[in-house]
Image (cartoon, helix red, strand yellow):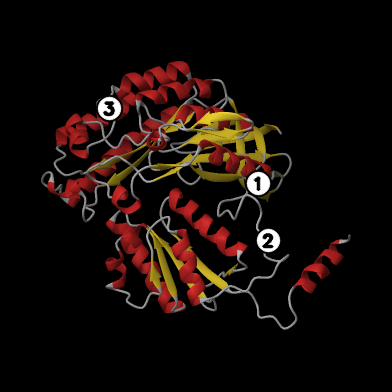
Amino acid sequence: MSPMANIDLVAQSIPAGAEPARKIGFVSLGCPKALVDSERIITRLRAEGYELARKHDGADLVIVNTCGFLDSAQAESLQAIATALRDNGKVIVTGCLGAEPEKITSQFPNVLAVTGPQRYEDVLDAVHRAAPPRHYPFVDLVPPEGIKLTPRHYAYLKISEGCNNRCSFCIIPRLRGGLKSRPAGDVLCEAERLVAAGVKELLVISQDTSAYGLDIKYATSRWKQRDVAARFLDLAAALGELGVWVRLHYVYPYPHVDAVVPLMAQGKVLPYLDVPFQHAAPTVLKRMRRPAAQEKTLDRIRAWRGICPDITLRSSFIVGFPGETESDFGFLLDWLEEAGLDRVGCFRYEPVKGAAANDLAEAVPDEVKEERWRRLMQRQQAISARRLRRHVGTRRQVIIDEVGSRAPDAWAKGRTKGDAPEIDGTVHVTSRRPLRIGELATVKIERADAYDLYGTVVGY
Protein backbone atom coordinates (compact mmCIF):
# COMPACT_ATOMS: atom_id res chain seq x y z
CA MET A 1 0.00 0.00 0.00
CA SER A 2 1.38 3.43 -0.96
CA PRO A 3 1.88 6.25 1.57
CA MET A 4 -0.95 8.18 -0.14
CA ALA A 5 -3.29 5.20 0.32
CA ASN A 6 -2.41 5.18 4.03
CA ILE A 7 -3.34 8.85 4.27
CA ASP A 8 -6.63 8.19 2.47
CA LEU A 9 -7.45 5.34 4.86
CA VAL A 10 -6.88 7.61 7.88
CA ALA A 11 -9.01 10.35 6.35
CA GLN A 12 -11.84 7.88 5.64
CA SER A 13 -11.79 6.70 9.27
CA ILE A 14 -12.87 10.15 10.52
CA PRO A 15 -16.65 10.47 10.41
CA ALA A 16 -17.97 12.95 7.85
CA GLY A 17 -18.63 16.30 9.48
CA ALA A 18 -16.93 15.24 12.70
CA GLU A 19 -15.68 17.99 14.95
CA PRO A 20 -11.91 18.40 15.32
CA ALA A 21 -10.12 16.73 18.23
CA ARG A 22 -10.03 18.48 21.57
CA LYS A 23 -6.82 20.45 22.18
CA ILE A 24 -5.07 20.61 25.55
CA GLY A 25 -2.42 23.12 26.58
CA PHE A 26 0.22 21.76 28.95
CA VAL A 27 2.79 23.30 31.27
CA SER A 28 5.28 20.99 33.03
CA LEU A 29 7.36 22.47 35.87
CA GLY A 30 9.83 21.02 38.35
CA CYS A 31 12.19 18.06 38.38
CA PRO A 32 12.59 15.11 35.98
CA LYS A 33 10.27 13.06 38.21
CA ALA A 34 7.50 15.60 37.52
CA LEU A 35 8.40 15.47 33.81
CA VAL A 36 7.72 11.72 33.82
CA ASP A 37 4.33 12.41 35.44
CA SER A 38 3.61 14.86 32.61
CA GLU A 39 4.59 12.26 30.02
CA ARG A 40 2.19 9.75 31.54
CA ILE A 41 -0.70 12.21 31.54
CA ILE A 42 0.00 13.27 27.96
CA THR A 43 0.25 9.63 26.84
CA ARG A 44 -3.20 8.96 28.31
CA LEU A 45 -4.61 12.10 26.68
CA ARG A 46 -3.21 11.20 23.25
CA ALA A 47 -4.54 7.65 23.59
CA GLU A 48 -8.01 9.16 24.05
CA GLY A 49 -7.74 11.34 20.98
CA TYR A 50 -6.74 14.67 22.51
CA GLU A 51 -4.19 16.85 20.76
CA LEU A 52 -1.60 19.10 22.42
CA ALA A 53 -1.92 22.81 21.75
CA ARG A 54 1.17 24.93 21.13
CA LYS A 55 -0.48 27.96 22.74
CA HIS A 56 -2.93 28.39 25.60
CA ASP A 57 -5.11 30.63 23.48
CA GLY A 58 -7.47 28.45 21.45
CA ALA A 59 -6.99 25.28 23.52
CA ASP A 60 -10.04 23.67 25.14
CA LEU A 61 -8.25 23.86 28.50
CA VAL A 62 -4.77 24.00 30.05
CA ILE A 63 -3.14 21.59 32.50
CA VAL A 64 -0.40 22.97 34.76
CA ASN A 65 1.83 20.36 36.43
CA THR A 66 3.30 22.27 39.36
CA CYS A 67 6.34 22.11 41.62
CA GLY A 68 5.96 22.79 45.33
CA PHE A 69 9.36 22.03 46.85
CA LEU A 70 10.74 25.56 47.41
CA ASP A 71 8.99 28.88 47.81
CA SER A 72 10.57 30.09 44.58
CA ALA A 73 9.23 27.00 42.75
CA GLN A 74 5.78 27.58 44.25
CA ALA A 75 5.88 31.18 43.05
CA GLU A 76 6.78 30.00 39.53
CA SER A 77 3.90 27.52 39.61
CA LEU A 78 1.41 30.14 40.76
CA GLN A 79 2.58 32.47 38.01
CA ALA A 80 2.10 29.70 35.42
CA ILE A 81 -1.46 29.16 36.68
CA ALA A 82 -2.17 32.90 36.48
CA THR A 83 -0.84 33.04 32.92
CA ALA A 84 -2.92 30.03 31.84
CA LEU A 85 -6.07 31.55 33.37
CA ARG A 86 -5.37 34.86 31.65
CA ASP A 87 -4.71 33.30 28.25
CA ASN A 88 -7.31 30.54 28.34
CA GLY A 89 -9.59 30.67 31.38
CA LYS A 90 -10.00 26.91 31.85
CA VAL A 91 -7.20 25.43 33.98
CA ILE A 92 -6.60 22.10 35.74
CA VAL A 93 -3.78 22.06 38.28
CA THR A 94 -1.82 18.96 39.30
CA GLY A 95 1.60 18.12 40.75
CA CYS A 96 3.32 18.74 44.08
CA LEU A 97 1.77 22.12 44.79
CA GLY A 98 -1.61 20.48 44.25
CA ALA A 99 -1.04 18.50 47.43
CA GLU A 100 -1.79 21.79 49.22
CA PRO A 101 -4.85 22.89 47.23
CA GLU A 102 -5.67 25.83 49.48
CA LYS A 103 -2.51 27.59 48.25
CA ILE A 104 -4.01 27.48 44.78
CA THR A 105 -7.72 27.95 45.36
CA SER A 106 -7.20 30.89 47.74
CA GLN A 107 -5.64 32.82 44.83
CA PHE A 108 -7.42 31.17 41.92
CA PRO A 109 -10.89 30.02 42.98
CA ASN A 110 -11.94 29.57 39.34
CA VAL A 111 -9.56 26.72 38.46
CA LEU A 112 -11.49 23.70 37.22
CA ALA A 113 -9.77 21.16 39.48
CA VAL A 114 -6.74 20.69 41.72
CA THR A 115 -5.06 17.30 42.18
CA GLY A 116 -1.88 16.18 43.88
CA PRO A 117 1.12 14.45 42.29
CA GLN A 118 0.71 11.08 40.57
CA ARG A 119 -3.09 11.48 40.50
CA TYR A 120 -3.34 10.65 36.81
CA GLU A 121 -6.90 9.34 36.97
CA ASP A 122 -8.14 12.48 38.72
CA VAL A 123 -6.53 14.65 36.04
CA LEU A 124 -8.18 12.62 33.27
CA ASP A 125 -11.54 12.75 35.05
CA ALA A 126 -11.30 16.54 35.27
CA VAL A 127 -10.41 16.75 31.57
CA HIS A 128 -13.35 14.51 30.67
CA ARG A 129 -15.76 16.74 32.58
CA ALA A 130 -14.51 19.96 31.00
CA ALA A 131 -13.78 18.72 27.48
CA PRO A 132 -15.15 15.22 26.70
CA PRO A 133 -12.94 13.36 24.21
CA ARG A 134 -13.74 12.82 20.56
CA HIS A 135 -12.12 9.48 19.79
CA TYR A 136 -11.56 8.16 16.26
CA PRO A 137 -10.19 4.59 15.89
CA PHE A 138 -7.17 4.24 13.57
CA VAL A 139 -6.33 7.91 14.06
CA ASP A 140 -5.62 8.20 17.80
CA LEU A 141 -2.56 5.97 17.85
CA VAL A 142 0.05 6.12 20.60
CA PRO A 143 3.50 4.52 20.21
CA PRO A 144 4.23 1.61 22.58
CA GLU A 145 6.79 3.66 24.53
CA GLY A 146 4.23 6.42 25.19
CA ILE A 147 4.63 10.14 24.60
CA LYS A 148 8.04 11.52 25.63
CA LEU A 149 8.84 15.15 26.35
CA THR A 150 12.59 14.59 26.07
CA PRO A 151 14.52 14.28 22.78
CA ARG A 152 14.14 10.90 21.08
CA HIS A 153 17.59 9.62 22.04
CA TYR A 154 17.25 9.79 25.83
CA ALA A 155 14.47 9.23 28.35
CA TYR A 156 13.88 9.33 32.09
CA LEU A 157 13.01 5.99 33.68
CA LYS A 158 11.21 6.46 37.00
CA ILE A 159 11.53 3.40 39.20
CA SER A 160 9.60 4.53 42.29
CA GLU A 161 7.42 7.25 43.72
CA GLY A 162 7.67 9.03 47.06
CA CYS A 163 10.29 8.82 49.78
CA ASN A 164 10.69 7.34 53.26
CA ASN A 165 13.38 9.79 54.39
CA ARG A 166 12.49 12.65 56.69
CA CYS A 167 15.13 15.25 55.89
CA SER A 168 14.34 18.34 57.92
CA PHE A 169 14.46 20.74 54.95
CA CYS A 170 12.22 18.66 52.65
CA ILE A 171 8.43 18.37 52.37
CA ILE A 172 8.44 15.93 49.44
CA PRO A 173 7.24 12.95 51.56
CA ARG A 174 4.27 15.05 52.62
CA LEU A 175 3.56 16.01 49.01
CA ARG A 176 4.28 12.70 47.28
CA GLY A 177 3.90 10.17 50.08
CA GLY A 178 6.14 7.31 51.16
CA LEU A 179 8.29 5.09 48.97
CA LYS A 180 6.31 3.11 46.38
CA SER A 181 8.59 0.99 44.20
CA ARG A 182 7.58 -0.38 40.82
CA PRO A 183 8.08 -4.11 40.17
CA ALA A 184 11.41 -4.71 38.46
CA GLY A 185 9.71 -6.52 35.57
CA ASP A 186 7.53 -3.47 34.84
CA VAL A 187 10.54 -1.14 34.89
CA LEU A 188 12.55 -3.40 32.60
CA CYS A 189 9.69 -3.86 30.13
CA GLU A 190 9.29 -0.08 29.91
CA ALA A 191 13.04 0.26 29.38
CA GLU A 192 12.89 -2.31 26.56
CA ARG A 193 10.09 -0.40 24.84
CA LEU A 194 12.09 2.81 25.06
CA VAL A 195 15.19 1.19 23.60
CA ALA A 196 13.14 -0.36 20.79
CA ALA A 197 11.86 3.14 19.99
CA GLY A 198 15.40 4.48 19.55
CA VAL A 199 16.34 5.67 23.04
CA LYS A 200 20.11 5.38 23.55
CA GLU A 201 20.35 6.69 27.11
CA LEU A 202 18.18 5.79 30.10
CA LEU A 203 18.29 8.17 33.05
CA VAL A 204 17.17 6.25 36.13
CA ILE A 205 15.35 8.52 38.58
CA SER A 206 13.29 8.46 41.75
CA GLN A 207 13.27 10.44 44.98
CA ASP A 208 15.72 7.96 46.57
CA THR A 209 17.00 5.59 43.89
CA SER A 210 19.19 3.50 46.18
CA ALA A 211 16.19 2.71 48.43
CA TYR A 212 14.44 1.03 45.51
CA GLY A 213 12.49 -2.09 46.52
CA LEU A 214 12.67 -1.59 50.28
CA ASP A 215 8.91 -1.08 50.58
CA ILE A 216 8.05 -4.24 48.64
CA LYS A 217 10.71 -6.33 50.40
CA TYR A 218 12.74 -6.60 47.17
CA ALA A 219 10.07 -8.82 45.61
CA THR A 220 10.94 -10.63 42.39
CA SER A 221 9.01 -10.32 39.13
CA ARG A 222 9.41 -11.93 35.72
CA TRP A 223 11.50 -10.52 32.90
CA LYS A 224 12.96 -12.48 29.98
CA GLN A 225 11.81 -15.77 31.49
CA ARG A 226 13.62 -15.19 34.75
CA ASP A 227 12.97 -13.61 38.15
CA VAL A 228 14.53 -10.21 38.86
CA ALA A 229 14.50 -8.76 42.37
CA ALA A 230 13.35 -5.21 42.98
CA ARG A 231 16.77 -4.30 44.32
CA PHE A 232 19.06 -1.45 43.25
CA LEU A 233 21.94 -3.72 42.22
CA ASP A 234 19.77 -6.29 40.42
CA LEU A 235 17.88 -3.64 38.49
CA ALA A 236 21.07 -1.83 37.46
CA ALA A 237 22.62 -5.10 36.26
CA ALA A 238 19.51 -5.99 34.23
CA LEU A 239 19.31 -2.54 32.65
CA GLY A 240 22.96 -2.96 31.72
CA GLU A 241 21.95 -5.83 29.43
CA LEU A 242 19.99 -3.54 27.09
CA GLY A 243 23.05 -2.18 25.28
CA VAL A 244 22.41 1.52 25.93
CA TRP A 245 23.78 4.12 28.33
CA VAL A 246 22.29 3.73 31.82
CA ARG A 247 22.77 6.74 34.11
CA LEU A 248 21.95 6.61 37.85
CA HIS A 249 20.52 9.71 39.53
CA TYR A 250 19.58 10.64 43.13
CA VAL A 251 21.60 7.85 44.71
CA TYR A 252 21.91 8.18 48.48
CA PRO A 253 25.28 6.83 49.68
CA TYR A 254 24.01 3.72 51.48
CA PRO A 255 26.63 0.96 51.86
CA HIS A 256 24.98 -1.29 49.27
CA VAL A 257 25.65 1.37 46.59
CA ASP A 258 29.30 0.22 46.63
CA ALA A 259 28.26 -3.00 44.86
CA VAL A 260 27.11 -1.06 41.76
CA VAL A 261 30.51 0.53 41.12
CA PRO A 262 32.02 -2.71 39.69
CA LEU A 263 29.21 -2.68 37.10
CA MET A 264 30.54 0.72 36.04
CA ALA A 265 34.08 -0.58 35.78
CA GLN A 266 32.77 -3.41 33.59
CA GLY A 267 30.96 -0.99 31.28
CA LYS A 268 27.48 -2.29 32.11
CA VAL A 269 26.20 1.04 33.43
CA LEU A 270 27.71 4.48 33.00
CA PRO A 271 30.55 5.42 35.38
CA TYR A 272 28.43 8.18 36.87
CA LEU A 273 26.79 8.72 40.25
CA ASP A 274 24.54 11.60 41.20
CA VAL A 275 24.76 11.62 45.02
CA PRO A 276 22.91 14.44 46.88
CA PHE A 277 25.36 14.92 49.77
CA GLN A 278 23.83 18.34 50.63
CA HIS A 279 26.57 19.20 53.17
CA ALA A 280 29.67 17.82 54.86
CA ALA A 281 29.81 19.36 58.34
CA PRO A 282 28.58 16.77 60.89
CA THR A 283 26.55 19.29 62.89
CA VAL A 284 24.70 20.50 59.78
CA LEU A 285 24.08 16.96 58.52
CA LYS A 286 22.63 16.05 61.89
CA ARG A 287 20.19 18.97 61.76
CA MET A 288 19.36 18.04 58.17
CA ARG A 289 18.55 14.46 59.29
CA ARG A 290 20.34 13.13 56.27
CA PRO A 291 20.30 9.36 55.76
CA ALA A 292 23.74 7.71 55.62
CA ALA A 293 25.27 10.90 57.07
CA GLN A 294 27.37 8.82 59.45
CA GLU A 295 29.21 7.12 56.59
CA LYS A 296 32.84 8.07 55.97
CA THR A 297 32.10 9.46 52.57
CA LEU A 298 35.63 10.54 51.66
CA ASP A 299 36.90 7.00 52.22
CA ARG A 300 34.09 5.63 50.09
CA ILE A 301 34.74 8.12 47.29
CA ARG A 302 38.38 7.00 47.25
CA ALA A 303 37.23 3.37 47.17
CA TRP A 304 34.85 4.04 44.26
CA ARG A 305 37.64 5.67 42.28
CA GLY A 306 39.93 2.78 43.10
CA ILE A 307 37.44 0.37 41.52
CA CYS A 308 36.41 2.65 38.63
CA PRO A 309 38.97 5.42 37.99
CA ASP A 310 36.77 7.03 35.31
CA ILE A 311 33.77 7.49 37.59
CA THR A 312 32.17 10.94 37.48
CA LEU A 313 30.65 12.15 40.74
CA ARG A 314 27.98 14.84 40.80
CA SER A 315 26.33 16.27 43.88
CA SER A 316 24.31 19.18 45.21
CA PHE A 317 24.78 21.21 48.38
CA ILE A 318 22.83 23.69 50.47
CA VAL A 319 24.51 26.75 51.97
CA GLY A 320 22.98 28.95 54.63
CA PHE A 321 21.11 26.11 56.34
CA PRO A 322 19.69 27.30 59.70
CA GLY A 323 22.48 27.37 62.27
CA GLU A 324 25.29 26.94 59.70
CA THR A 325 28.35 28.68 61.12
CA GLU A 326 31.39 29.99 59.31
CA SER A 327 33.24 27.01 60.75
CA ASP A 328 30.64 24.63 59.27
CA PHE A 329 30.95 26.31 55.91
CA GLY A 330 34.76 26.18 56.05
CA PHE A 331 34.51 22.46 56.79
CA LEU A 332 32.37 22.06 53.64
CA LEU A 333 34.91 23.93 51.49
CA ASP A 334 37.77 21.79 52.79
CA TRP A 335 35.70 18.65 52.21
CA LEU A 336 35.00 19.67 48.62
CA GLU A 337 38.69 20.20 48.00
CA GLU A 338 39.52 16.75 49.29
CA ALA A 339 36.58 15.01 47.62
CA GLY A 340 37.33 16.54 44.22
CA LEU A 341 33.80 16.08 42.90
CA ASP A 342 33.45 16.51 39.16
CA ARG A 343 30.14 18.37 39.07
CA VAL A 344 28.47 20.36 41.84
CA GLY A 345 25.25 22.32 42.14
CA CYS A 346 24.67 24.69 45.04
CA PHE A 347 21.46 26.13 46.47
CA ARG A 348 20.88 28.90 48.96
CA TYR A 349 18.62 27.58 51.72
CA GLU A 350 14.98 28.60 51.36
CA PRO A 351 12.64 28.26 54.36
CA VAL A 352 9.84 26.11 52.94
CA LYS A 353 6.58 26.39 54.86
CA GLY A 354 6.06 23.25 56.91
CA ALA A 355 9.72 22.14 56.87
CA ALA A 356 11.10 21.22 60.29
CA ALA A 357 14.44 22.89 59.50
CA ASN A 358 12.93 26.35 59.84
CA ASP A 359 12.68 25.99 63.63
CA LEU A 360 15.88 24.07 64.35
CA ALA A 361 18.29 26.99 64.66
CA GLU A 362 18.74 30.66 63.92
CA ALA A 363 18.29 31.66 60.29
CA VAL A 364 21.38 32.66 58.31
CA PRO A 365 21.07 36.19 56.86
CA ASP A 366 20.44 36.36 53.12
CA GLU A 367 23.62 38.34 52.47
CA VAL A 368 25.66 35.63 54.22
CA LYS A 369 23.96 32.92 52.15
CA GLU A 370 24.82 34.81 48.98
CA GLU A 371 28.45 35.31 50.00
CA ARG A 372 28.85 31.62 50.88
CA TRP A 373 27.20 30.55 47.65
CA ARG A 374 29.69 32.64 45.65
CA ARG A 375 32.67 31.30 47.57
CA LEU A 376 31.56 27.69 47.13
CA MET A 377 30.95 28.10 43.40
CA GLN A 378 34.35 29.77 42.94
CA ARG A 379 36.06 26.94 44.81
CA GLN A 380 34.20 24.27 42.86
CA GLN A 381 34.86 25.99 39.55
CA ALA A 382 38.58 25.55 40.12
CA ILE A 383 38.09 21.92 41.15
CA SER A 384 35.93 21.17 38.11
CA ALA A 385 38.46 22.80 35.79
CA ARG A 386 41.22 20.57 37.20
CA ARG A 387 39.06 17.47 36.80
CA LEU A 388 38.16 18.31 33.21
CA ARG A 389 41.76 18.99 32.19
CA ARG A 390 42.45 15.29 32.77
CA HIS A 391 40.43 14.56 29.62
CA VAL A 392 42.58 16.68 27.29
CA GLY A 393 44.39 14.42 24.83
CA THR A 394 42.04 11.47 25.44
CA ARG A 395 39.37 10.01 23.17
CA ARG A 396 35.83 10.00 24.55
CA GLN A 397 32.57 8.60 23.32
CA VAL A 398 30.09 11.45 22.93
CA ILE A 399 26.32 11.34 22.40
CA ILE A 400 25.17 14.17 20.14
CA ASP A 401 22.37 16.46 21.41
CA GLU A 402 22.50 19.38 18.96
CA VAL A 403 23.87 19.81 15.44
CA GLY A 404 24.59 22.61 12.98
CA SER A 405 26.87 23.59 10.14
CA ARG A 406 29.71 26.05 9.95
CA ALA A 407 32.05 25.92 6.95
CA PRO A 408 34.34 24.18 6.43
CA ASP A 409 33.40 21.79 9.27
CA ALA A 410 30.15 20.66 10.82
CA TRP A 411 29.67 21.47 14.50
CA ALA A 412 27.70 19.78 17.23
CA LYS A 413 27.16 19.73 20.97
CA GLY A 414 27.08 16.51 22.92
CA ARG A 415 27.89 14.82 26.20
CA THR A 416 30.38 12.29 27.48
CA LYS A 417 29.42 9.42 29.75
CA GLY A 418 30.18 11.82 32.60
CA ASP A 419 27.59 14.42 31.61
CA ALA A 420 23.85 14.25 32.24
CA PRO A 421 21.54 16.34 30.05
CA GLU A 422 20.44 19.76 31.28
CA ILE A 423 22.57 19.78 34.46
CA ASP A 424 26.17 18.96 33.48
CA GLY A 425 28.65 20.17 30.90
CA THR A 426 28.79 20.01 27.12
CA VAL A 427 31.30 18.74 24.58
CA HIS A 428 31.68 21.21 21.68
CA VAL A 429 32.50 19.11 18.62
CA THR A 430 33.76 19.76 15.09
CA SER A 431 33.44 17.08 12.44
CA ARG A 432 34.36 16.44 8.81
CA ARG A 433 30.79 15.40 8.08
CA PRO A 434 27.42 16.44 9.53
CA LEU A 435 26.45 14.56 12.66
CA ARG A 436 22.99 13.38 13.63
CA ILE A 437 21.18 13.99 16.92
CA GLY A 438 21.44 10.83 19.00
CA GLU A 439 24.55 9.61 17.17
CA LEU A 440 27.50 8.28 19.17
CA ALA A 441 30.86 9.63 18.02
CA THR A 442 34.44 9.22 19.21
CA VAL A 443 35.90 12.63 19.96
CA LYS A 444 39.51 13.59 20.65
CA ILE A 445 39.43 16.17 23.45
CA GLU A 446 41.67 19.14 22.62
CA ARG A 447 40.92 21.62 25.40
CA ALA A 448 38.77 22.20 28.47
CA ASP A 449 37.41 25.06 30.55
CA ALA A 450 35.69 25.05 33.93
CA TYR A 451 32.53 23.41 32.60
CA ASP A 452 32.88 22.18 29.01
CA LEU A 453 35.15 20.18 26.72
CA TYR A 454 36.16 20.88 23.11
CA GLY A 455 37.28 18.39 20.51
CA THR A 456 37.21 16.87 17.03
CA VAL A 457 35.46 13.72 15.87
CA VAL A 458 37.96 10.96 15.04
CA GLY A 459 35.54 8.06 14.73
CA TYR A 460 31.88 7.40 13.94
Q: CA distance from mark 3 to mark 1?
A: 38 Å
Mark 1, Cα crowd under 10 Å, few <14 / some 14-19 / many 20+, is some
From the top left corner, tell me how far across and down residue 418 is, in percent. Answer: 50, 33
Sooner in the amino-acid sequence: mark 3 or mark 1: 3
In this orientation, which residue lies closer to the viewer: 202 or 312?
202
Three-letter amino acid code at the position of disc 2: Leu
Q: Which mark is residue 437?
A: 1
Residue most extreme to the left = 362
The residue pinned by badge 3 equals: 335
Give the numbered dot on residue 141.
2
Q: Quadrant of the C terminus?
A: top right
Which amino acid type is shown beneath numbered disc 1? Ile
Above or below, comparing residue 2 to residue 401 in the picture:
below
Does residue 150 appear left or right of residue 62 in this picture?
Answer: right
- Asked whether residue 428 appears in the rendered view, the answer is no
In the image, 296 versus 193, the foreground residue is: 193
Where is residue 152? Give x, y as percent: 62, 49
In percent of width and height, residue 81 lies at 39, 70
Local crowd at mark 3 within 10 Å, few (<14), some, or many (≥20)? some
Task: Name the secondary structure under disc 1.
Answer: loop
**328 lies above or below 438:** above
On residue 98, which mark appears? none
Disc 2, SS: loop
